[in-house]
Image (tube, rainbow, N blue to C red):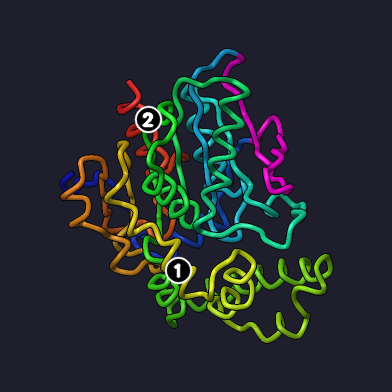
Amino acid sequence: MPLIKTEYNAPGIFKNAHVSSIYAATLRKVDFRFKVKNRIELSDGDFLDLERSFYSTENEKIIILLHGLAGNANRPYMLGMAKHFQDNAWDVASMNFRSCSGKINRLYRSYHAGATEDLEAVINHLQQENKYKEIGLVGFSLGGNLMLKYLGEQNEIPSEIKSAVAVSTPCDLGASLEELNKTHNFLYSKRFIKNLKKELQLRQTYFPSEITKEEITQCNSLLAIDELYTSRAHGFKDASDYYKKCSCIGFLPKIKIPTLLLNAQNDTFLSPHSYPVEVAKNSEFLHLEIPKHGGHVGFFQRKKLYYHEQRALKFISERNQ
């Protein structure tokens, strides 16, 4: 598909990437609450929690939402998307990745950017429960990478999955980590490191033989955390092996359902590989939209609805007709 001409025009100060990113992540308020929490038992003995909301008891369509690094189902960007879809007659299932619902998971492993088996488990659970005829997927950042990898690595996906949208997605994990390490991203990377080390410290109390307090203390970068924990706990040789095998960039050409990748040109988290223009041009299914502004999941508009929410519903609804 050719590059999509965007309709997004950031107002005033929100043309600044840091303003739009920080405001959306920390100051935005969304008047929406999920109605039900479901716990899914996984085949490896672990669990994850879903936040659910229902438009009606007999609805035949559902949207599945996937959050970003150190996020959860109740972050403002997740609530905003959930509210907009429910307001437009969709059921919503918002994933909490392992350990992201406020309850530590049972295993030493947790979640990572390529853990597509957990998305598959959620889809299977929802279909066994309700037999939805239409499923849409929306992933943010790390969750967008996971979703795109899932769509491209499967020989077949359930026919009920009609379309998908990835927002602010790092398609090359290693290259985007290098961007996060740059000076202008210092506050973001520092916050990620703080939150991830806090999670590791909790995990150490449950699995003291797997990781030590000293090892965690010495982690002063996202790369160090991925070397110490993410790669080892999930069966990769090292961080480089993890980034190589889990980056969605290599899976994009194999996607076979209509999929929108919405990445702002001024997103300071993303590397050039996160704007796969040539892949989109040669793909029947990958639609690429690159607004000039929007930062990282910060597509602010002068109304409660954000542009990426409006765009996701429009894209998915058009393809599901």
Q: Position of residue 276 (x, y in %)?
A: 25, 58
**Nearer to us in this view, 113 or 290:** 113
Question: Which residue is at 21% across, 50% downward?
Answer: 280
Question: Which residue is at 68% across, 73% downward?
Answer: 197
**Nearer to us in this view, 167 or 132:** 132
Pointer 2 with pointer 1, Cβ within 8 A: no
- Which quadrant, please, contains the N terminus? top left
**Nearer to us in this view, 281 or 87:** 281
Q: Secondary structure at mark 2?
A: strand
Query: Is residue 255 shown in magenta?
Result: no
Residue tagged by mark 2? Answer: 162
Question: Taking 171 as reference, is 272 left or right?
Answer: left
Question: Which label number is shown at residue 243?
Answer: 1
Question: Taking 115 as reference, is 133 left or right?
Answer: left
- Residue 317 image-quadrant placement: top left
**Which range of residues does the magenta coloring cover?**
33-57
Q: Is residue 302 visible?
A: no
> Which numbered disc, 2 or 1, marks the residue closer to the eye?
1
